[in-house]
Amino acid sequence: MNRIIKKYSSIWFVLALILILQQMPVSANQGDIPVEVPNFPVHLNGFAVPDNTQYPLLVYKGITYVPLTQELANLLNLTVVWNPHVSSLYVIADPTPKSNLSGLSEGTVNNKTKRFYAKDADYPVYVNEQPIDRTYPALNCQDITYFPLTWAIAVEQLGWSYSFDSVTGLTINSQNYSPD
């Protein structure tokens, strides 16, 4: 009788352990940093950023993050360069004026309530030769690098105009951009 009780006790212990482990979060290195789509309007160089892009803007720790796609890099007058010799990504303000961009293309529809999970970029990311502050690190989501639009990066390092209020949301205008 004792063996039967011990056998069932072991089974119940294993089942309880499995249930507990299913409730535990995965480590941060595996992409479990919860991020969300902004619940406010965002305008970049006069273009409203739609919610239905394949790589939406994200919010982490109250800071908006921009995906470093070619389209958004062009829109924000940025040059993005991967240096394979030092395994680092460089984001550089491009002094060449850009104009006549078609705006932002649509992609897969994303629901604002959809959850996304990111992870810390496992390589250094520099903005105008300055490393990104680890308080708001560069993130990876859907295999795309995202960089934070902090005041220090957007205004101090890139020289952009930056405003946020509860009605108009986030508005960023980069230098050397002309929508005409």
Image (tube, rainbow, N blue to C red):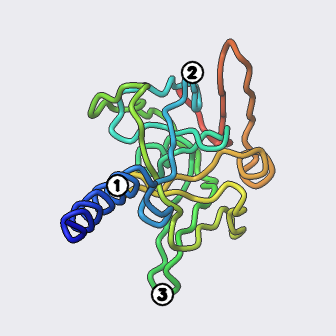
Q: Mark 2: give few (<14), some (14-19) or many (20+) Cα within 10 Å.
A: some
C-alpha separation, residue under disc 2 versus residue under disc 3: 39 Å
Nearer the N terminus, badge 2 or badge 3? 2
Which marked residue is nearer to the observer: mark 1 or mark 3? 1
Q: Which residue has dot 2 on it?
A: 41
Q: Mark 3: give few (<14), some (14-19) or many (20+) Cα within 10 Å.
A: few
Q: Which residue has dot 3 on it?
A: 85
Query: The residue under label 1 is which amino acid type?
Result: Ala
**The N terminus lies in quadrant:** bottom left
Instruction: Please state the horizontal and vertical placement of residue 56, each as a whole percent of the image.
Output: 43, 37
Residue lying at the far bottom in this picture: please name it.
Answer: 85
Nearer the N terminus, badge 1 or badge 2? 1
Element under label 1? helix
Element under label 3? loop
* Residue displayed at 26% across by 33% down: 108
Query: The residue under label 2 is which amino acid type?
Result: Pro
Q: Which residue has dot 1 on it?
A: 16
Query: The residue under label 3 is which amino acid type?
Result: His
The answer to whether 165 appears left or right of 59 in the picture is: right
Instruction: Say above or below: 35 vs 26.
Output: above
Which image quadrant is residue 94 in? Answer: bottom right
Q: Mark 1: give few (<14), some (14-19) or many (20+) Cα within 10 Å.
A: few
Instruction: Say above or below: 50 vs 130.
Output: above
The answer to whether 73 appears left or right of 51 in the picture is: right
* Residue displayed at 57% across by 44% down: 65
The answer to whether 163 appears left or right of 41 in the picture is: right
Which marked residue is nearer to the observer: mark 2 or mark 3? 2
Instruction: Please state the horizontal and vertical placement of residue 151, each as a whole percent of the image.
Output: 77, 44
Nearer the N terminus, badge 1 or badge 3? 1
Element under label 2? loop
Q: Are marks 1 and 3 in contact (CB under 8 Å)?
A: no
